[in-house]
Image (cartoon, grey):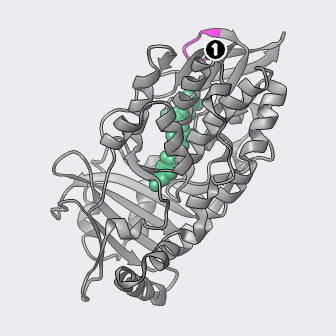
Amino acid sequence: MHVLISGASVAGPVLAYWLHRNGHRVTVVERTARPRLGDGGHAVDLLGPAVEVVARMGLLPQVEAARTTADTMTLIRPGRPDVTIDGAQLLAGVSDRHVEIMRGDLARILFEATREHVSYTFGTSITELVERDGGVHAAFSDGTSGGFDLVVGADGMHSGVRRLVFGPEEGHSHFLGGCLAVFSVPDLVGLDGRVLGYNSVNKAVALYPTKIPGRARVVVLFRAAEPAPRDPAAQRRLLRGVCAGLGWEVPRLLEHLDAADDFYLDSISQIRLPSWSRGRITLAGDAGYGPGPAVGGGSSLAIVGAYVLASELAAAGDDHVPGFAAYERAMAGAVAASRTIGPSVLGTLIPRSELQVWTMAQALRVLPRLPGFVQRKLTSFGGGPAAMLNGVRLRDPLVLRA
Ligand SMILES: Cc1cc2nc3c(=O)[nH]c(=O)nc-3n(C[C@H](O)[C@H](O)[C@H](O)COP(=O)(O)OP(=O)(O)OC[C@H]3O[C@@H](n4cnc5c(N)ncnc54)[C@H](O)[C@@H]3O)c2cc1C
């Protein structure tokens, strides 16, 4: 088969790898003009089965070499003593098999592993999809067009394929009541491997080092009554309004907002579709079942979902009708579980009251003194991210045709 994939970040290249391994021809179109390189955006977590998929691709050494680690996390409390905790203790409950890596590094490793066998076109999007004559006709933004046997949208939370096939995003995107902003700044405070956090009612700010010496990244999570605007100027205004009156280094960090060329702000929303396949077209990763940015689990779900899609297609003898149905059945439990993570993580990370600001600091202070199993329970966010993928069966890669 000739399979067209939209999106070359996480789900797209993993799917391309396994489809190629299974004897298919694969074309990937990616909207951005070049592969995501450099220190790339934000840190993502690969948990249990996602680490296993990466290992089966032979990429674990590269992924582990690029992993990021926070030595310590310090909660800043102006006027009161800071609370510092070991980074490993903070993540104790997330998963016993866990790798944190910048999304750009992960995307680059996946792209390098597939570029020889997969046709990548950057700076291009799908503009039209029509199913006819036992295939799908696709038109592209560069004016070209072509016929494919199957099409997969792996193009993220704001998926173009989902819009073309299932209609406007508003119908599938469920706002969780929070927003997330990320932008790069000079390392004003000399982080030296530390992550610094500062909380206020309805707002949480974190500052963490990047791989570029002298640079740091700011993350602001905040509660909001409505989804974020899409216009960058309006987003910057919104962030300034949200941060007005905040103490610590926040005013100095905001001085660098206009100069940040990687400024990102989005609603924390989940993609909820009763079924994410229609005819010969399906979705993988955030496009089909994104649990929400920054709440955890999205990258692992994208990797495992792409693997499961390729293996269920193979197990169905490349017949997309039973193959797509088996893919959706296999992922249903994990997708349902992933939807519980966002509300739980938002409830924990963004304090609702001065009392919660205080209790969070006290909880962090006592955490290192608690027995290991209690630490793991308290840092597991209700077991969400770690437990989410437990029920997914990773078929043996040998079911895939050589
Ligand atoms: C700030 C932030 C922090 C996050 N933190 C975490 C975390 O700690 N842990 C975690 O697990 N996850 C985290 N996530 C979520 C994680 O990044 C995603 O779940 C994961 O990247 C999903 O992979 P994906 O391949 O499905 O989609 P994406 O990584 O979003 O990739 C989609 C790709 O499709 C491309 N694209 C978009 N539209 C089109 C189009 N119309 N045509 C062609 N190409 C298109 C995009 O350019 C992109 O390359 C975070 C996300 C953000 C934004």
- The quarter of the image holding the N terminus is top right
Q: Main secondary structure of the magenta part?
A: loop
Let me know if residue 141 is in the magenta part.
yes
Residue 149: give x, y in percent of width and height. Answer: 73, 15
Residue 30 relative to residue 82: left or right: right
Please identify the quarter of the rendering in which residue 145 is found. Answer: top right
**Picture layout, residue 238 above or below residue 245:** above
Q: Is residue 50 visible?
A: yes
Residue to which mark 1 is pinned: 24
Residue 72: give x, y in percent of width and height. Answer: 27, 67
- The quarter of the image holding the C terminus is top right
23 vs 228, nearest the viewer: 23
Identity of the residue drawn at 72% across and 50% down: 272
Identity of the residue drawn at 54% across and 31% down: 14
Residue 106 relative to residue 157: left or right: left
Disc 1 crowd, CA 10 A, few/some/many (<14, 14-19, 20+): some
Magenta span:
140-145
Residue 152 relative to residue 198: left or right: right
Identity of the residue drawn at 24% across and 70% down: 249
Label 1 sits on a secondary structure element that is loop
